[in-house]
Image (cartoon, grey):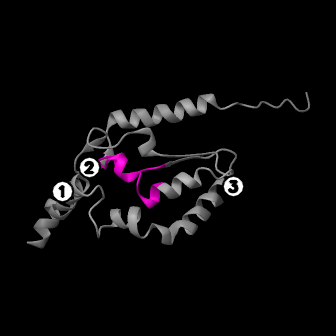
Amino acid sequence: MSSLLKELKTLGILLHIGHYFSFQIMGTPLPGTNFYKYCFEDYSNNKSVIEEEILKIVRQFDDVYILVNYPFFAPSKDLRKSSAYSFYDSLAKNPEINYLVQSIDIINGGLNASVSWQNGHPNQRSVSKISDHFSNLMKQKTTIISADGF
């Protein structure tokens, strides 16, 4: 029976249903899940590690564009209240970071932005908006051409 449930992915479907109703009722992911812990509970324990890892990567390159992704079925207005959102919002102001944006600031999440209510991946429309956002950002970047030695 348990192998049949795994094959049907019943637990995953139940979890998505729980998240959906939890957002509708409480404005948060389902308490006790990893999604909830990441955004609302345990995030403060990881802030210094995450910041140091991001800065370690950024310091190696001239330009780094960072997209912090959230499940697209989750309403952006609710996720903007999370400790994760606040942390990345403040990290984006670090002068060492060229550009850090959160997906919920480009795409207003919710059912219209995701593949479906149970799939948090972005739909094609959302992927296009994110691609356009980064494409426009890179087009605006000033290119410095050096002609040293000529």
- Identify the residue shown where x is 34% and y is 62%: 35
Residue 123 part of the magenta-drawn span? no
Which residue ends up furthest to the left in the rendered image? 1
Q: Label 2, secondary structure: give it.
A: strand
- Residue named by callout 1: 17
Q: Quadrant of the N terminus?
A: bottom left
Left or right of 133 in this view: 40: left
The earlier-in-sequence mark between 2 and 3 is: 3
Label 3 neighbour load within 10 Å: few <14, some 14-19, many 20+: few
The earlier-in-sequence mark between 1 and 2 is: 1
Marks counted in the figure total 3
Residue 82 part of the magenta-drawn span? yes
Question: Is mark 2 in CB contact (under 8 Å) with mark 3?
Answer: no
Q: Label 1, secondary structure: give it.
A: helix
Measured as percent of width and height from the top left, residue 28 is found at: 30, 58
- Residue named by callout 2: 119
Viewer-nearest of discs 1 and 2: 1
Type of the residue with mark 1? Ile
- Residue named by callout 3: 59
Q: Label 3, secondary structure: give it.
A: loop
Report the magenta residues as a range. Answer: 68-85
The part of the image, by quadrant, that contains residue 55 is: bottom right
Measured as percent of width and height from the top left, residue 114 is found at: 29, 43
Q: Nearer the viewer, residue 63 or 98?
A: 98
Left or right of 19 in this view: 62: right
Measured as percent of width and height from the top left, residue 9 is found at: 17, 61
Which residue ends up furthest to the right in the rendered image? 149
